[in-house]
Amino acid sequence: MSYLVLARKYRPRNFEEMVGQAHVVQALSNALTTQRLHHAYMFTGTRGVGKTTVSRILAKSLNCQGPDGQGGITATPCGVCQACKDIDSGRFVDYTELDAASNRGVDEVQSLLEQAVYKPVQGRFKVFMIDEVHMLTSTAFNAMLKTLEEPPEYLKFVLATTDPQKVPVTVLSRCLQFNLRPMAPETVLEHLTQVLKTEDVPADVQALRLLARAARGSMRDALSLTDQAIAFGNGTLVEGGVRQMLGTVDRGHVFRLIDALAAGDGKTVVETSETLRRDGLSAASTLEEMTTVLQAMAVLQAVPARADHAADGTDPDAAETARLAASMPPDETQLLYSLCLHGRGELGLAPDEYAALTMVLLRLLAFKPSAEKKTLNEPVRAVRPVERAVAVASPADTPVAAKSRVATVAPVIHAPPGHRLAIVEPPALAAAEPRKIAAAVDAAQGVPGVVAMQVRVQPPPGMRDMAREQSSSTPLVTSEDGDFWHEAVSQLVAAEAISALTRELALQSQLVARDVDQWLLRVERESLNQVASREKLQAALATLGHGVKLAVEIGNVVDSPARRNKLAAEARQKAAEEAIHNDPLVQSMMRDFDARIVPGTLRPA
């Protein structure tokens, strides 16, 4: 007896056996039960999700005679009557399947439609099933439109396609459309477990998990891969053998890479990449596995409550994923996910895919957001309102003591640009240590060793969005520093001295404080705070005679060149619109000829 592959052996014979398409099964079952039947159905979806299978089950439901030969239209075909058995075996005369991929011309379609004038020979309905219908020519589509719209009462059309965008809308409008969804890996895993239990084939859960992920939503692909894995493992499915067969990368390598990237360990990244090269593992598979892990990490970072749900023991990688999620900041997780996702497209462009993989991974270290220190190198600077706390140390204090002494809130001090201000602690601390405070004040007047530090607290993700929305609605608050910064940035933009991210950093930032050799900028987005952009902006400012070092903080921006430019553009637009509306000639045309000004067409000269 010849061997029957699993994909054919376990093809569903009725709606109860269908997996992962409950929405389609429910709609068709209710329609069959109430006999509210449409004359044309279209099933769409990717390969291996059950389009042809649903078509055959629907044909059996329409033509089932029941075990006693007295049955009618039913949502549960018996599977034992002659009609059901003939449809399953592919020899039912009233059920015709046309493969439009190889029979796409008008002649083949006309030959099929010529059979429509004859009533069913054996069954209750004729069923014409056209697979991959999007492959038909435009002439063939036009030939079937009339029959598809008004077929005889005994004829049902079933169309299936993997690309509904290529089907003419005139055909889509005549059909009842159902979209069969790709199946979740958990659904595929559960079905494979039941199939192998029936086949009495021992299998590791992790091996089945790899097969379920490799199927990419297709149950047919999952069963075909399972057949291959059974042959590869000589009747047994183990994780190592399945991983070797699929060429997938061990999650241990992926965890090691992400751990090294989080710690900034470039040496481990390069060594792991060389290990993958030596073992002959796929670079594309490495990036794919990394994106899967990073996506799970991002979910845990955004919804920490899911960590308990993930650690229920069903996924052995859940604990390691949770550890990595806690060790890497959310913005780095998103950046690394984006780099891995786009890096897959670069592998084919490089002469060596492993070298390309190494470059993709090292790119995170190059663009990794650096922790911006608020400690200025020089002892003096202009002080603006401190957001959280100020740490003050006298020259006699040790670094540890200086860090441990933190004031609560510093008073708001306004000073002209370039002036040097002393840093004074609150009265409670000053009363406790008057000598050290006096020494700190004296040191702030010119003695090196006084450090002013603003502590930045990273807000939660939801608060960041709220703060950004509030900032966009905050009215512009101009200042002397804002006027100076707007003029400097405008000169740089006009001279094309800055571009790309450097220009965005200059336009979107607010000049918070100016010292003789250091300026403090504030931006709202962490992505603008890049070392390369900051250094390029410093070099551009030097060409204007401002040889200063830039420091950048994250916060609410109320006065930036971009906001000023936007308000100026809106004012010019409003003035232009008022000038047009107030023009006597325009008013006379609107009055005498019922003319209208099309919104959005006015532009200031």
Image (cartoon, helix red, strand yellow):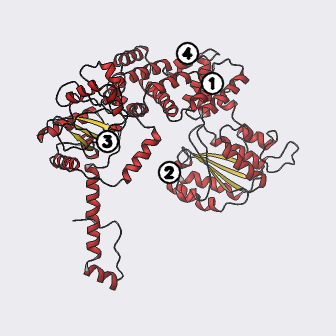
How far apart marks 3 and 4 lie (CA) works out to: 49 Å
- Residue 378 can be seen, yes or no: no
Near-viewer residue (296 or 189):
296
Q: Which residue is mark 1?
A: 314
Using the image, tell me which numbered label, if any, was put on residue 523.
3
Instruction: Tell me residue 464's x, y (percent).
Output: 42, 42
Query: In the rendered structure, are the residues bearing label 4 and label 1 in contact, judged by CB atoms less than 8 Å apart?
Result: no
Mark closer to the chain start, 2 or 3: 2
Q: Mark 2 Cα within 10 Å, few/some/many (few <14, many 20+)?
A: few
Q: Earlier in the sequence, mark 4 or mark 1?
A: 4
Q: CA distance from mark 2 to mark 4?
A: 42 Å
Q: In this rendering, is residue 68 above or below 576?
A: above
Q: Which residue is labeled 2 in the image? A: 166
Q: Tag count in the figure?
A: 4
Type of residue at label 1? Thr
Marks 1/3: CA–CA distance: 43 Å
Judge left or right: residue 506 versus residue 264: left
Nearer the observer: mark 3 or 4; the answer is: 3
Q: Secondary structure at mark 2?
A: helix
Indicate which label's residue lies in the foreground, 2 or 4. Answer: 4
* Circle 4 crowding by C-alpha within 10 Å: few under 14, some 14–19, many from 20: some
Q: Quadrant of the C terminus?
A: bottom left
Measured Cα–Cα span from mark 2 to mark 3: 46 Å
Earlier-in-chain disc, 3 versus 4 = 4
Left or right for 94, reference 569:
right
The tag earlier along the polypeptide, 1 or 2, is 2
Q: Which residue does the numbered mark 4 point to in the structure image?
A: 240
Q: Nearer the viewer, mark 1 or mark 3?
A: 3
